[in-house]
Amino acid sequence: MESETGLLTIKYGDFHYSLSFSRNGWLAAELVQYLDEVIEAGDTRVAILKLLGYTMLISRERPERIADHWIEVDLAARELTTNSEVVRQAVEQEPPTEGQPYGPLALRRIHAVLDKYDFTVRLKKR
């Protein structure tokens, strides 16, 4: 998993805010557990900047799905679309297997955030 790439995209308004990982792509899925901070923030754009950092790409078009783990979040529609096995494990409430770099707490938190805000999750094949 260390050599896998990752991409997290959050659509807010007319823009897509994206952060890519050239290594440790599973981190894109792990960031999903902090969506509640973005949703509950007084200024959503500032909260997205804090979550994704200042190295993200901002564009009107959705970026190409070329990462090993890509996650797209549409805040207005409360939809998350992904090919990430990490999110799949969280949604299906499966425990992490040996050798995976994330623990059960991250999976439970991802599930809790998606459930709390009633996200529709669309799981795509890798």
Image (cartoon, rainbow, N blue to C red):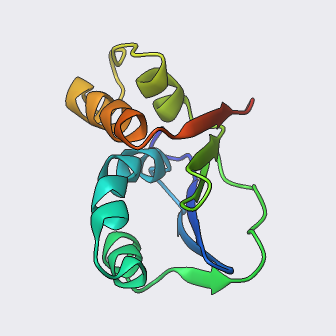
Q: Is residue 46 visible?
A: yes
Q: Quadrant of residue 112?
A: top left
Viewer-side residue, 9 vs 119: 119
Viewer-side residue, 91 vs 14: 14
Q: Position of residue 61 (x, y in %)?
A: 78, 76
Numbered marks: total: 0
**Above/below status of 9 relative to 2:** below
**Above/below status of 93 relative to 79:** above
Q: Position of residue 119 (x, y in %)?
A: 52, 40
**Above/below status of 29 relative to 36:** above
Q: For the view shown, which residue lies furthest in the left direction?
A: 105
Q: Position of residue 59 (x, y in %)?
A: 69, 84
Q: Quadrant of the C terminus?
A: top right
Q: Is residue 69 visible?
A: no
Q: Quadrant of residue 49?
A: bottom left
Viewer-side residue, 23 vs 82: 82
**Above/below status of 98 relative to 15:** above
> Who's the residue at 36% across and 27% down the image?
100
Q: Is residue 86 left or right of residue 11?
A: left
Q: Quadrant of residue 47?
A: bottom left
Q: Position of residue 78 (x, y in %)?
A: 55, 50
Q: Is residue 41 left or right of residue 86?
A: left
> Who's the residue at 40% across and 74% down the image?
48
> Who's the residue at 62% across and 77% down the image?
13
